[in-house]
Each structure stands twice: as structure tokens, then as C-alpha cells.
Image (cartoon, helix red, strand yellow):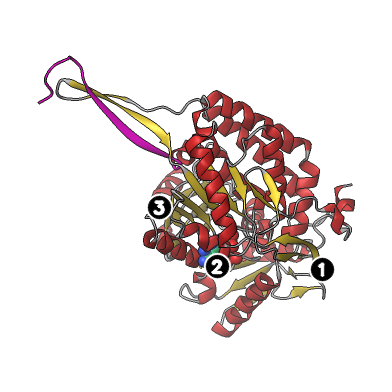
Amino acid sequence: MASDLFNGRLEDVKFTQLFVNGSFVDSLSGKTFQTIDPRTGDVIAAVAEGTKEDVDAAVQAARHAFDSGPWPRFPGSERGRILMKLADLIDQNAEELAALDAIDAGKLYRWSKTEISSVANMLRYYAGAADKIHGEVLKMSREFHAYTLLEPIGVVGHIIPWNFPSTMFFAKVSPSLAAGCTMVVKPAEQTPLSALFYAHLAKLAGIPDGVLNVITGFGPTAGAAISSHMDIDKVSFTGSTQVGREVMQAAAKSNLKQVSLELGGKSPIIIFDDADVDKAVELALIGVLYNKGEICAAGSRVFVQEGIYDEFEKKLVQKAKAWAVGDPFDPNVQQGPQVDKKQFEKILSYIEHGKREGATLLTGGKAVGNRGYYIEPTVFINVEEDMVIAQDEIFGPVMVLMKFKTMEEAIKSANNTKYGLAAGIVTKNIDIANTVSRSIRAGTIWINCYFAFGDDVPFGGYKMSGFGKEHGMEAVHKYLQVKSVVTPIYNSPWL
Ligand code: ADP
């Protein structure tokens, strides 16, 4: 049983050092930090604390691997073969990897296992893309012709959040590896463990030394050293909007490296009168409770049309009260603990704020148990659109439920946010579905479904949810740059 792997036995965590130039090493300062089990608040392991000097060493290795190593020069098919091998190694170690994310991030073990097999498939998608990267032949209007080369952008810095330690790692690492880049990855300080395991597997798969470096450590030190580095060509960040802004500023102030940002959200789910109420309740609950609400695309604002509102509210409360919160290794549990004490306290303080603002707590609102970081599924009603709980990303199991009359009113309310990551629409009416999906300013629209992600479906924000897509071929192009090559067709004077 994978859960037995982590019954408080620290020796079960195999990789706790930085991964630089193909080797596990202590941080140059020798410092470590503790990663905590959110089920109990106990320490899981001490992990190397990388700082600017470690980032410098990793960038140096990545630069050398890019300028002189085989990775960018391999035929794409060879990169693809190695990525396929890495995918197989991930599948072979899925239980242990899933347990690492479950214990480090409080994710449900069974969902974590699904996530691990999805990241293996994501790698396979990009392995298949690696030999299909090519430019275009262009017909110039004069006696010339031109073509474009798509070249890997160089050394990439990836800054990863804690809510999906494996998916976010591979959403960034796989397309950039396929493109031929080399990289320095900084996992979140709350969830460093699986990334180090992936570094070990990458070496076994045959990824050359220096191509993939992993520096564990804190945001303001190791993270900031990446975004302000003079020899990193691109930074890809997923996390809060506030830190995204800092990353972009640091990039601008240093070497103008390219930036892509996948940031926060306050996504609406709009449920129309013709919806099947039971199904709509399920969808709305999963929309806000999946991964205990710690997901940027959470459908945390739910708008229900007045004709079905009362029935929806009644059924929602019943289901929310029956939602099982508890140990993420228990197969009957639907929601584990929040990632850490800070996030747990932040969510509870938003709930208090909501009450003070005058919203009504329909259900939930309290911590569960007196150990670990568990919070009840929480629903607020009597919410005004300008309240803090209706505007801020809470990143927890907290829904604001609102009633609407007309489609036009729903569109206006749904767009009343600085964010634009995703939206859900529940209706059988194709005209409503088409009109609303074109009217919402968000990067992904799910009609009669939610969280329907796909390796080939681009995902990313509008407005202050960021820019640059993850998934799909768009993600490969994020790590490529276009070079134009022009030559005369005949051996003729060129002017
Ligand atoms: P949250 O606020 O939800 O914890 P963050 O946006 O702070 O999310 O964290 C996402 C990632 O960004 C983490 O890997 C974190 O270490 C990193 N990070 C935090 N602050 C900075 C910073 N100033 N510069 C670069 N990276 C940072």
C-alpha cells in the first residue's frame, strides 16, 4: 500500500537535494527547509534550500548544455524517444509519486494517481510533437525566397506552484524539452518532493546532464533569482497574480527575458433554467471543491437562474453537507487538507470577512477536526458582486452562489472580475451556449462540463489571469523563436 510508504518514516523520502548538472547536491550554503504534512502539521523531510548561488550554478549548467550539449542538436525523434522513456518510468513509479504529492500537498491519493498517469501521457503527447517542429517556406514578392526556422529559445526558468506539483511541472517541462530547451525548475517550497523524484527519473531516461536542473527553495530568493537572471532567456510562471507581476517586473529590469504567466482566477459557472438540477449541482460542487478548491480554474462564483434557484440551493446544501472531508489516503474521502497552515488560515479569514461583509453562510465555514488543515465545503448566499469574497481568489472550498434573471444579466455579472481564466455554462439551449461562450472574456469555456482539460487543448488566461498557453502545440511555440532566412533565387545582384 502506497500509504504505508509514508507512515511518518522520513527515510521513505529518497530525494531531498538539489539536482544540478545531472547530480544530486546539497545547497551551496548547506541550508535546508522543512516540508510539512498538511494532514498533521508534522515534518515530512528536510529539503535543500537553494538560493541565488545555486540558481547561478544551475543556469551555468543549463547554458553549457544548450550551447554545446546534444539536446538542442538531437533530431526531434531522439528527444521524443527519451521523453517516451521518461513517461514509462513515471508509470512504473506512479504509486510512490502519487503518495509524494498526496502527503506533500494534501491531494487525494486516488486522484493523485490519475494525475500521475496523465502527466505520463502529457509527456507522450509532447514526445510525438518533438519531430514535428518546423518553419515555413515563404514566397517573397521579389527575386528572393525565404524560410523560417523555429529554434529553441534557450535556457528557460520554470517557477511552479504547489497545487498541482506534477501536472504543473510537466505542463512546463515537457513542451520545453520537446522544443530543445534546457532549463532550471523551481518547485513551490510547500511541495518540493515529486519534482526531485522526476529529476532522478529524467536522468535514468537519458536526458543529458545540465538539460533539466531542479532547485528547491523559496520564492523571494530562488524564484526571484530566476526571474531576474541575466542568462535565462524565458521565464514561465504559474502562481498568484501578485507574484506574477513581480516576475514580470524582474524580467523587465534584468535582461528583458520573455515571460509567460498563468495566474489566478475567479471563474463563473452559469446555470440556466433548462439544466438538469441534480447534474448541475454535482458540476458546481466539483467546480469549487476539486483539489479542495486549490485550483486556479475553480468555478468559485456560481450563478443560477431564478426558475430553478430554490431547488438548486436546497440540493446543493444537502450534497455539500454530505461531502466527505478527511485523510487523502482514505478511498471514501472526497476532500483532503489545504496545502499548509498559511493557506488554511487565509481561507478561514476570507470566510470571516464574508460574514462581516454581510453575506450569509448557507453551509460550512469552519475548520474540520483539531489537527491538520481541513475546511468544510462552504457556500455563501446574499452576496453582492463587489464584495471581497466575490472578487478575490480565495483558493479554497468556498463558493459564492448568486441568482440571475436574464442571460444578459448573467453575462454582465460573470464578466465583473479582473480575472479571465475559465467559465462554465450549463444549458441545453445551443443559442444560449453559443452566445454566452462568445461573450465571456476568459481563456477556456466549458459547456455542460467542467475541468475538462486535454493535452491538446490550450489553457491560459485573459485579463489578469495572465498570458501564454499551457497544453497543446501553443505550449511548444512558447519555447521556440522564429528566425527568418532570406536568399536570392537566382545568382543575381540583390539590389
Ligand atoms: P501562493 O501565493 O499561492 O503560494 P505564489 O505565487 O506565491 O503562490 O507561488 C508560486 C511560485 O512562485 C512558488 O514556486 C513560489 O516559490 C514562487 N515565488 C514566490 N514569490 C516569488 C518571487 N518574488 N519571485 C519569483 N518566484 C516567486
- Alpha-carbon neighbours of circle 2 within 10 Å: few (<14), some, or many (≥20)? few
Q: Which residue, given by chain and number where applicable, does mark 1 sit on?
A: 40
Which residue is painted at 40% across and 52% down in the image?
A: 257
Nearest to the observer: residue 334 or residue 187: 187
**369 part of magenta stretch:** no
Confirm if mark 2 falls within 8 A of ligand 1.
yes
180 w.r.t. 451: above or below: above
Q: CA distance from mark 1 to mark 3?
A: 41 Å
Looking at the image, tell me whether mark 2 or mark 1 is earlier in sequence order: 1
**483 part of magenta stretch:** yes
Which residue is painted at 43% across and 41% down in the image?
A: 153
On the image, which quarter does residue 340 sit in?
A: bottom right
The magenta span reads 478-495
Q: Are marks 2 and 1 in contact (CB under 8 Å)?
A: no
Q: CA distance from mark 2 to mark 3?
A: 18 Å
Q: Are marks 1 and 3 in contact (CB under 8 Å)?
A: no
Q: Which residue, given by chain and number where applicable, does mark 2 sit on?
A: 220
Q: CA distance from mark 2 to mark 1?
A: 27 Å
Report the amino acid beneath label 1.
Thr
Report the amino acid beneath label 3.
Lys
Answer with left or right where residue 14 lies relative to residue 135.
Answer: right
Nearest to the observer: residue 293 or residue 428: 293
Would residue 271 be visible to someone looking at this image? no
Q: Position of residue 286 (x, y in %)?
A: 66, 55
Nearest to the observer: residue 185 or residue 160: 185
- Alpha-carbon neighbours of circle 3 within 10 Å: few (<14), some, or many (≥20)? many
Instruction: State the SS at label 3.
Output: loop
Looking at the image, tell me whether mark 2 or mark 3 is earlier in sequence order: 2
